[in-house]
Image (cartoon, helix red, strand yellow):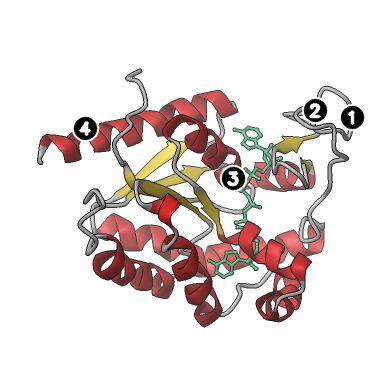
Amino acid sequence: MAEATSRGIGPVILLGSPGAGKGTQAKLIVERYRIPQISTGDLLRENVQRGTPLGLLAKDVMARGELVPDDLMYDMVAQRLRQVDCERGFILDGFPRNPAQAGWLDAFLEHEFFGNAQRDRCLPIVIRIDVDYNKLLRRITGRRSCPVCGRIYNVYSQPPHVADRCDVDGSTLVTREDDREEVIRERLAAYEQQTKPVAEYYARKGRLVSVDGDLPVNEVTEQIFRVIEGQHAGATGNN
Ligand code: AP5
């Protein structure tokens, strides 16, 4: 596979249900292309932990497995995307999550991202990770993550070398508050009702590519790199 490019690759949008592997794959894309992962779930959890006004508003909504109101999301995402490390591109993990957010993102990119001459004009690469519904519960209930470096594990499929300890920094792994079975069902329902149409939104624009997320992590990653490099080659070929 071609070496990672030092040129910008533009926005990469990862879609997929809770537990599909968006966070796992986003971290591998970061390593290869050196563009930041913007996980709206992680940003919200940081706000909850710090007790910010946004965190206080979001806490109970997230605990119920529902979506945080759009207006709160827009401010948070806009602030993050305006940071300098996003200039070569970025990976959106967990955003957009409904068609209104997708429309907002299109307008934001048009006016603020592509409007800046410093930035490469690469259209968003939209990748949906498809996973069999019946596997999602096991993936989510088995998930553990490192509170320090954010690395994601799974007690069934990707256990750490030492039980409950991060391989990278030895921290005690944690389980997310919303990874309880009753909340997971709400999150999956929110995905079915509100987030699935986002894929249709991008499919209508001819921008959606699906990858098979049922495969082992490294095979999913290979598919994603192929999509990114294929689209990047197409975009630069047209320049
Ligand atoms: P968020 O944090 O975005 O959670 P999510 O979308 O539910 O996704 P997850 O983080 O659960 O799953 P993932 O796809 O990242 O899977 P992972 O890689 O960890 O959102 C949380 C909440 O924040 C929402 O409910 C909402 O309230 C709020 N929110 C966030 N964004 C919002 C927005 N835009 N608007 C409004 N509200 C918003 O993998 C899962 C497990 O599977 C891991 O254990 C992993 O090791 C394992 N695994 C991964 N890949 C594989 C594989 N190929 N094979 C086997 N196991 C695998």
Determine whether the beta carbon of the residue marked 4 sits less than 8 angstroms from the nearest atom of ligand 1. no
Give the residue drawn at x 26%, y 32%.
230
Give the residue drawn at x 49%, y 46%.
36
- Tag 2–tag 1 contact (CB < 8 Å): yes
> What residue would you read off at disc 1?
163
- Tag 4–tag 3 contact (CB < 8 Å): no
Please state the total of marks drawn on the protein image.
Answer: 4
Separation of marks 3 and 1 at Cα, in angstroms: 21 Å
Query: How far across and how far down the image is residue 146, in percent?
Result: 77, 42
Q: Quadrant of the N terminus?
A: top left
Determine whether the beta carbon of the residue marked 3 sits less than 8 angstroms from the nearest atom of ligand 1. yes
- Tag 1–tag 4 contact (CB < 8 Å): no
Tell me the amino acid under the disc marked 1.
Ala
Q: Earlier in the sequence, mark 1 or mark 4?
A: 1
Label 2 crowd (10 A; few <14 / some 14-19 / many >=20): some
In the foreground, 194 or 229: 229
Q: Earlier in the sequence, mark 2 or mark 4?
A: 2
Query: How far across and how far down the image is residue 208, in percent?
Result: 32, 49
> What residue would you read off at disc 3?
23
Residue 137, above or below 28: below
> What residue would you read off at disc 2?
160
Q: Earlier in the sequence, mark 3 or mark 1?
A: 3
* Mark 4: secondary structure: helix
In the foreground, 200 or 177: 177
Query: How far across and how far down the image is residue 232, in percent?
Result: 25, 37
The quadrant in which residue 180 appears is bottom right
- Tag 2–tag 3 contact (CB < 8 Å): no
Separation of marks 2 and 1 at Cα, in angstroms: 6 Å
Give the residue drawn at x 71%, y 70%.
62
Q: Which mark is residue 233?
A: 4
Residue 74, above or below 117: below
Separation of marks 4 and 3 at Cα, in angstroms: 25 Å
